[in-house]
Amino acid sequence: MSRIIILAIIGCLSIIPIGWTQQFGYVSPIGPANWSTLNPDWAICGNGNRQSPINIPTESSSYWPQLSLEIFNGDSLLSGTLMNNEHSVEYAIDNTVTDINRPYLRATYESASFQDGDYVLQQFHFHWGSVDSRGSENQFNGMSSVAEVHFVCRNTLFNSSQAGNEANEFLVLGVLLRVCENSDFYPVFGPNNSFLDQIMSDPDEVPVSLRLSGIYNCGGPCTDTNSYYTFQGSFTTPPCSEAVAWWVAEDMLCISQAQLDMLRSQNVTSAGPRLTDNYRPIQELNQRTILTNTNAATTTLMNMSLSLFLLLLALLFV
Ligand SMILES: *[C@@H]1O[C@H](CO)[C@@H](O)[C@H](O)[C@H]1NC(C)=O
Ligand SMILES: *[C@@H]1O[C@H](CO)[C@@H](O)[C@H](O)[C@H]1NC(C)=O
Ligand SMILES: *[C@@H]1O[C@H](CO)[C@@H](O)[C@H](O)[C@H]1NC(C)=O
Ligand SMILES: *[C@@H]1O[C@H](CO)[C@@H](O)[C@H](O)[C@H]1NC(C)=O
Ligand SMILES: [Zn+2]
């Protein structure tokens, strides 16, 4: 009896001083529009100026051919856990896997305003929509795709005991997904998607061993010939820390219709509601620069050089 009372008191003490929820979601009353007021530590979700996701206007991005994102240790066999964490379906590498045995991404900008660095993979997770017209978080020229995967990596200059507020503490590689007959995600979703079938609601999880190269083997960060858009941003879930160097691939990866359907039928808890449309609406770009090494921007630049050339020519003849 007294133990119950003590527990009740401890319970109140721990609830009252904190007094703020750690719960957020994608539907009212804990949807994205309210994240900034659910917890004082999440205020930046509402008043930040480098929030994610964004709409990427491809034509007005700055062409920067030196950009590259290379992957190392992509063939390491990883032990990890696939889970429904109430906000997403996530594959997290086990803490016992040391950095030296993990894949890492090398971000090269060769620019004064962005810092080059190596970022070690921590986890990857998915955002998706309930219908085909939406689901990705980032957009290209106002267009969404059905889903997006985020590969979350931590800068080797930082460690997990740090706050997560430095601008370049994390790198997130975002890749939009489209529906194809063959999926890029069989190693993580399992034979006949059986792993996905085992994690239909929080706190379901299943141990999964995989190699990143088995998933992302389509010439993504494996090669520096790939096309990216990169900019400074935030986590797209609370606490929305503006600590992320974003790299969004121009090319999409493939998810099968069966896998997309199974994501759409995930539940937040076994009692529901459905876990779907778990994407945050796009945020203001504000004064941010978007760098890209894509051909689209090359064309724009070439057009600009051509105009400049014609202008110079015109001046010569004046
Ligand atoms: C925000 O909270 C208010 C009050 O609880 C609620 O009426 C509203 O629907 C919520 N909005 C979202 C987007 O969750
Ligand atoms: C994490 O980084 C901080 C600051 O550089 C350092 O003081 C601390 O010892 C590091 N912790 C671990 C576990 O490496
Ligand atoms: C694959 O999963 C579907 C749906 O759960 C099931 O109907 C089918 O029998 C499974 N196929 C195999 C080969 O296990
Ligand atoms: C998910 O929740 C819905 C109600 O929102 C329910 O009909 C369905 O059976 C649940 N699915 C699972 C796998 O628990
Ligand atoms: Zn995400």
Image (tube, helix red, strand yellow):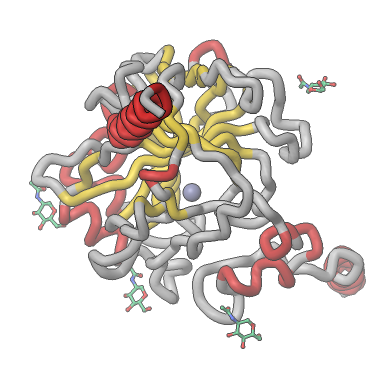
- In the image, taking residue 157 as reference, residue 26 lies left or right, namely left
For the residue pair 247 and 275, the one nearer the viewer reads as: 247
- In the image, taking residue 202 as reference, residue 36 lies left or right, namely right
Q: Position of residue 207 (x, y in %)?
A: 40, 37
Residue at (48% x, 20% y) in the render:
105
Tell me which corner region of the image, top left, top right, bottom left or bottom right, holds residue 34. Answer: bottom right
Query: Is 202 placed above or below 71 here?
Result: below
- In the image, taking residue 190 as reference, residue 113 lies left or right, namely right
Residue at (57% x, 59% y) in the render:
284
User: Which quarter of the figure is the N terminus placed in?
Assistant: bottom right
Residue at (67% x, 39% y) in the render:
243
Q: Position of residue 259 (x, y in %)?
A: 22, 52
Does residue 82 appear anywhere in the picture? no
* Ligand 1 image-quadrant field: bottom right
Residue at (28% x, 47% y) in the render:
177
Tell me which corner region of the image, top left, top right, bottom left or bottom right, holds residue 168. Answer: top right
Q: Position of residue 278 (x, y in %)?
A: 44, 63
Does residue 281 appear anywhere in the picture? yes
For the residue pair 220 and 156, the one nearer the viewer reads as: 220
Query: Is 198 placed above or below 173 here?
Result: below
Q: Position of residue 120 (x, y in %)?
A: 54, 23
User: Which quarter of the figure is the C terminus placed in?
Assistant: top left
Query: Is 127 placed above or below 132 here?
Result: above
For the residue pair 21 and 226, the one nearer the viewer reads as: 226
